[in-house]
Image: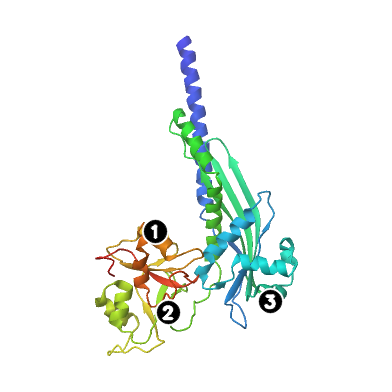
């Protein structure tokens, strides 16, 4: 009789554990689908009249109890926004100008857009409101939710260029394989609710908004930003503006570290048989990877691609980029050598400039 009771209790415990595990799996599955959602776009229009070249990311509003969430998300937008090709006004400069003009950041949505545009010296204004920011902890399962509403407005005519809302969810909580693994799962879940994970979730949210936002072809004067990325099609395409004394051989060596691929460039652009180039001519450069984040350089097959391109973001430097590509910041000269004609100041990489990233080092820093 005692054995039967013991067996019954064991079976009941096992059933509870299985039920608990299935519940955790269902929760994880639901969030797995949620993370693949895209922003709900309410309005999207191309700018009219004067082209939008400069954007100011205004102080974000916060409708949640999580203090600082608005600043975190605003910073994430600034870090990633250069991928759209616009010039950005520095956040500190925006805040200083608003303060000098007596504008209360908490009432920024009530101010006249034309007036704000003149104050911050921008063609378009980006408004943001944090609508959700929560951390939930359920023992072996944790969840972070950040939601926002974003609006890009033409400061000249107050016309909405882009308006959308989205909620991003980050979750942690693998189903324990045995009751003994539950403490480990609890530790993993608790780590997930740290501030860094909140920042990472905000960063993904910002990237999804920006990806769906209308961009601008990056246009610069000759001998400035001669490499550009166009996102009209997927994948993004790389273009190069011909400079004085350029040759197809030299351009091929520049982008592929292989002069023999000059024929690929010629064919891609249907150049005449003499392959004559004109200064200012824009050439499509095929088969060059575009790095949205510099960390992606680690995942590219170096046997197939020796070089990629990357659009500089706020906070980047040659040393920082080299640290992430080669795991050695002292090798920044390798990146500089590949962009010697385009980089005028090694201590100041302009946000939005497209540079070539060597993916491997050949010889004694010889590229």
* x then y, percent, for residue 116: 70, 72
**Which residue in the structure is indicated by mark 1?**
323
Which of the pair 264/322 is nearer the observer?
322
Q: Give left or right: position of 217 versus 49.
A: left
Can residue 43 be seen in the rendering of this structure? no
Q: Give left or right: position of 167 versus 361.
A: right
The quarter of the image holding the C terminus is bottom left
Q: CA distance from mark 2 to mark 3?
A: 30 Å
**Secondary structure found at label 3:** helix
Question: Residue at left 46%, top 68%?
Answer: 312
Q: Is residue 302 above or below residue 198?
A: below
Q: Earlier in the sequence, mark 2 or mark 1?
A: 2
**Secondary structure found at label 2:** loop
Q: Give left or right: position of 278 versus 188.
A: left
Can residue 139 be seen in the rendering of this structure? yes
Question: Residue at left 55%, top 57%?
Answer: 205
* x then y, percent, for residue 181: 45, 31
Give yes or no for contact between labels 1 and 3 (Cβ–Cβ under 8 Å): no
Q: Earlier in the sequence, mark 1 or mark 3?
A: 3
Q: CA distance from mark 1 to mark 3?
A: 39 Å
Pointer 1 local density, CA inside 10 Å: few below 14, some 14–19, many at least 20: some
Which of the pair 89/309 is nearer the observer?
89
Q: Is residue 287 above or below residue 321?
A: below
Q: Which mark is residue 66?
A: none
Pointer 2 local density, CA inside 10 Å: few below 14, some 14–19, many at least 20: many
Classify residue 71 by image quadrant: bottom right
* x then y, percent, for residue 114: 71, 76
**Which residue in the structure is indicated by mark 3?**
118
How many numbered dots are placed on residues in this image? 3
Q: Earlier in the sequence, mark 2 or mark 3?
A: 3
**Which residue in the structure is indicated by mark 2?**
226
């Amino acid at each position: 009789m005692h054995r039967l009771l013991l067996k019954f209790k064991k079976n009941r415990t096992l059933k509870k554990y299985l039920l608990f595990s299935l519940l955790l799996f269902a929760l994880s599955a639901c969030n797995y689908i949620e993370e693949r959602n895209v922003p709900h776009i309410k309005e999207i229009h191309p700018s009219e009249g004067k082209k939008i070249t400069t954007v100011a990311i205004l102080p974000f509003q916060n409708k949640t109890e999580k203090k600082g969430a608005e600043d975190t998300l605003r910073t994430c937008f600034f870090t990633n926004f250069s991928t759209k090709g616009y010039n950005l006004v520095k956040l500190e400069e925006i805040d200083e100008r608003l303060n000098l003009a007596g504008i209360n950041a908490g009432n920024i949505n009530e101010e006249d857009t034309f007036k704000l545009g003149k104050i911050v010296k921008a063609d378009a204004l980006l408004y943001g409101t944090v609508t959700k920011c929560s951390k939930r902890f359920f023992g072996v399962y944790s969840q972070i939710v950040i939601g926002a509403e974003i609006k890009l407005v033409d400061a000249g005519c107050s016309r909405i260029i882009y308006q959308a809302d989205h909620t991003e969810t980050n979750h942690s909580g693998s189903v324990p394989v045995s009751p003994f693994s539950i403490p480990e799962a609890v530790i993993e879940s608790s780590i997930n609710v740290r501030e860094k994970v909140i920042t990472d979730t905000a960063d993904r949210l910002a990237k999804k908004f920006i990806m769906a936002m209308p961009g601008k072809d990056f246009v610069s004067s000759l001998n400035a930003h001669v490499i550009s990325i166009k996102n009209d099609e997927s994948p993004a395409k790389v273009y190069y503006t011909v400079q004085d004394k350029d040759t197809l051989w030299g351009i091929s060596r520049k982008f592929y570290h292989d002069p023999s691929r000059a024929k690929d460039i010629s064919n891609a652009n249907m150049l005449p048989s003499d392959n004559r180039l004109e200064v200012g001519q824009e050439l499509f450069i095929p088969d060059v990877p575009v790095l949205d984040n510099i960390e992606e350089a680690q995942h590219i097959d170096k046997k197939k691609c020796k070089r990629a391109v990357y659009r500089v973001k706020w906070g980047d430097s040659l040393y920082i980029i080299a640290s992430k590509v080669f795991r050695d910041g002292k090798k920044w000269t390798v990146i500089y050598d590949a962009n010697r004609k385009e980089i005028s100041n090694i201590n100041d990489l302009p946000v939005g400039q497209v540079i070539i990233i060597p993916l491997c080092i050949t010889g004694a820093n010889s590229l």
